[in-house]
Amino acid sequence: MQYGLVRFLALAALLAVSACAEADAVIDREVRGQAKAAVNNVVQSQFPGVNAAPVTDCIIDNASRTEIFQVAKASVTGADPETVQLVLEIAQRPDTVKCILNNGVLLLG
């Protein structure tokens, strides 16, 4: 009888963790999508004429989770100078620059 209860509780805990992980993944996807919209706007305004999509992807891929959450707020409130600065800072990181160049995008300016 004890073994059955322990097994049930273990299974319930596993399902709860799995549900939390799935919810976390959905939230991450939504926040990344909002951050992409904000970054795309910044890239378009700072680098007119450049194909913003691959640059945006590189910036998002090289941002920390905290930075993504910070930038995502700008999709609702609009990009303030701090958001623009953060996006430009991430864009200048070596891995981001490498990604941008690998995607055939040149930022002239």
Image (tube, rainbow, N blue to C red):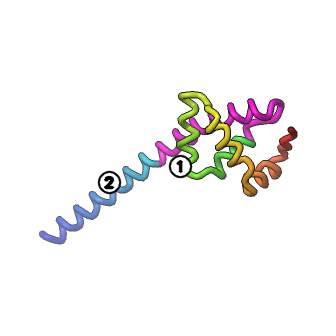
Q: Position of residue 56 (x, y in %)?
A: 70, 41
Majority secondary structure in the magenta region = helix
Q: Earlier in the sequence, mark 1 or mark 2?
A: 2
Q: Residue at x 57, y 35 (%)?
A: 34
Q: Position of residue 27 (x, y in %)?
A: 47, 43
Residue tagged 2 = 16
Q: Which residue occupies the foreground of this view, 104 or 62?
A: 62
* Placement of 20 over or under 72, stated as above or below: below
Which residue in the rendered view is the most extreme toward the bottom?
3
* Placement of 12 over or under 54, stated as above or below: below
Residue tagged 1 = 66
Query: What quarter of the picture does the C terminus occupy?
Result: top right
Q: Residue at x 81, y 30 (%)?
A: 48
Q: Which residues are magenta?
A: 25-54
Q: Does residue 101 appear in this view?
A: yes
Q: Position of residue 24 (x, y in %)?
A: 44, 48
**Amino acid type at image mark 1:** Thr
Q: Does residue 33 appear in this view?
A: no
**Amino acid type at image mark 2:** Ala
Q: Which residue occupies the foreground of this view, 33 or 5?
A: 33
Secondary structure under the numbered disc 2 in the rendered image: helix
The answer to which image quadrant residue 35 occupies is: top right
Secondary structure under the numbered disc 1 in the rendered image: helix
